[in-house]
Amino acid sequence: MVSDPTGKDAVIIDTPADAEKILQAVDGLGVKFILITHGHSDHLGALSEVKAALNVPVAVHPEDASRLPVSPDMMLEHGQSLPLGKHKLKVVHTPGHTPGSVCFLLAGHLFAGDTLFPNGPGKTNSPRDFDVIMESLVHQVFVLPGETVVYPGHGGSTILGKEKKLFEAFSKRPRKQGLCGDVVWMA
């Protein structure tokens, strides 16, 4: 959940398994959207229940829409801005982990789903997917300021400048042909 500084408006980013916990976290807030970073079940486990309880629009990139257990109300596009109080969340399409993976950028904070983790990219299922996620990182994520705080879909946060440096070192080394799966920058 992300709320504007006044604490009145909020969005939910992904809905893992515990609907009750999500609903408690947003109690008293004006939730505007349920935003989905990608269509994997570990990010959707509570979507049906949370959607039913809040009756707010569910938004996802069209390439992952068919993976949702409910019909989305809104399709996200790269560069689109979504209102959050006096601020705007920017949609950043970052395919690779899934075709419809997106991140959300808000005032120096990147909610990265499974596109970027501390010490590596999100898991990919093929060498082609790995190339696609690398393109997403290079052209959509690593162009952001180094002080951007990254909140991945799993685990702790990181600072983008640190990840850029690790990626640069990774990029200079020879890469095993057919690389994909769980990749770590400095393995």
Image (cartoon, rainbow, N blue to C red):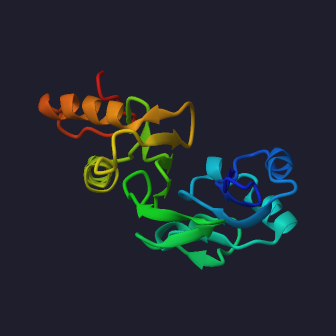
The residue at the point 35 percent across, 28 percent down is: 184
Residue 121 lies in what quarter of the image? Answer: top left
On screen, residue 77 versus residue 137, left or right, reads: right
Residue 9 image offset from top left, x and y in percent: 73, 62
Residue 20 image offset from top left, x and y in percent: 86, 48
Quarter that holds the C terminus: top left
The residue at the point 14 percent across, 28 percent down is: 173
Q: Is residue 31 above or below residue 23?
A: below
On screen, residue 31 versus residue 20, left or right, reads: left
The residue at the point 80 percent across, 53 percent down is: 26
Residue 117 image offset from top left, x and y in percent: 45, 36
On screen, residue 97 versus residue 152, left or right, reads: left
Residue 52 image offset from top left, x and y in percent: 84, 67
Q: Is residue 145 above or below residue 87?
A: above
Q: Is residue 174 above or below residue 77?
A: above
Q: Nearer the viewer, residue 91 or 181?
A: 91
Q: Residue furthest top?
A: 187
Q: Is residue 120 above or below residue 31?
A: above
The residue at the point 38 percent across, 58 percent down is: 95
Could you tell me how many numbered marks the image carries?
0
Residue 70 lies in what quarter of the image? Answer: bottom right
